Structure formats: C-alpha cells, structure tokens
Image (cartoon, rainbow, N blue to C red):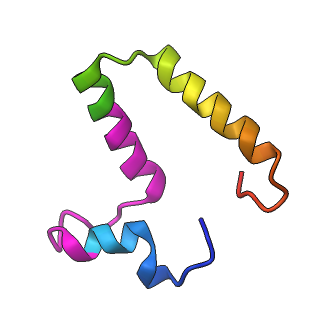
Amino acid sequence: MREVPSCGSLVAQAVNRGHPVLAKGRTAPGMYALLATRYSKEYGAGEEALGAVATKNYYHGSLNPTAHL
C-alpha cells in the first residue's frame, strides 16, 4: 500500500521466497491475519488488544490525507 512496483511488495517477496504453490493467492490482509493469530496464541493477546491496535492505526491513518484506508 505504498508507491512501489508490484514486484517489490511484501506479498510479492513472500511469494518469491516461499513455496511456489503454497504462497500463491496470498494477500497483505491475509498475511497480517496469520501473523496476528500467531501473535495472539504465543503472547496471549486477546481480541480487545488487537482491536485497540486497529483502532489506533485507523485513527492515525485518518490524520494522513494520503493514507490508504
């Protein structure tokens, strides 16, 4: 979600570095959902904590006129 060519995106990098079949179809939201789930299980963070992060991020994004909401 920034001005980089698609081949330089985080999703493209994950696809290029990962298994050629298993990495297909990944999206940024899907990757972040996997990371959030793992973080939640490893550190015991509940939905409230992750929701607070989302609320904070959305608020700060609303202050940036060029942010992708």
The residue that appears at 43% across and 59% down in the rendered structure is 27
Q: Quadrant of the N terminus?
A: bottom right
Does 41 lie within the magenta span? no
Q: Is residue 29 left or right of residue 22?
A: right
The residue that appears at 73% across and 41% down in the rendered structure is 60
Measuring from the top left, give residue 3's x and y in whole percent: 63, 77
The residue that appears at 27% across and 33% down in the rendered structure is 38
Residue in front for this viewpoint, 66 or 6: 66
Q: Is residue 22 left or right of residue 40?
A: left
Answer with the quarter of the image where residue 20 lies: bottom left
Measuring from the top left, give residue 33's x and y in whole percent: 40, 41
Residue in front for this viewpoint, 34 or 59: 59
* Residue range (magenta): 16-37
Q: Is residue 37 left or right of residue 6?
A: left
Q: Is residue 40 left or right of residue 32?
A: left
Question: 40 above or below 20?
Answer: above
Question: 60 above or below 49?
Answer: below
Does 36 lie within the magenta span? yes
The residue that appears at 43% across and 80% down in the rendered structure is 8
Answer with the quarter of the image where residue 24 lies: bottom left
Measuring from the top left, give residue 52's x and y in whole percent: 58, 23
Question: 4 above or below 23?
Answer: below
Measuring from the top left, give residue 44's x and y in whole percent: 30, 16
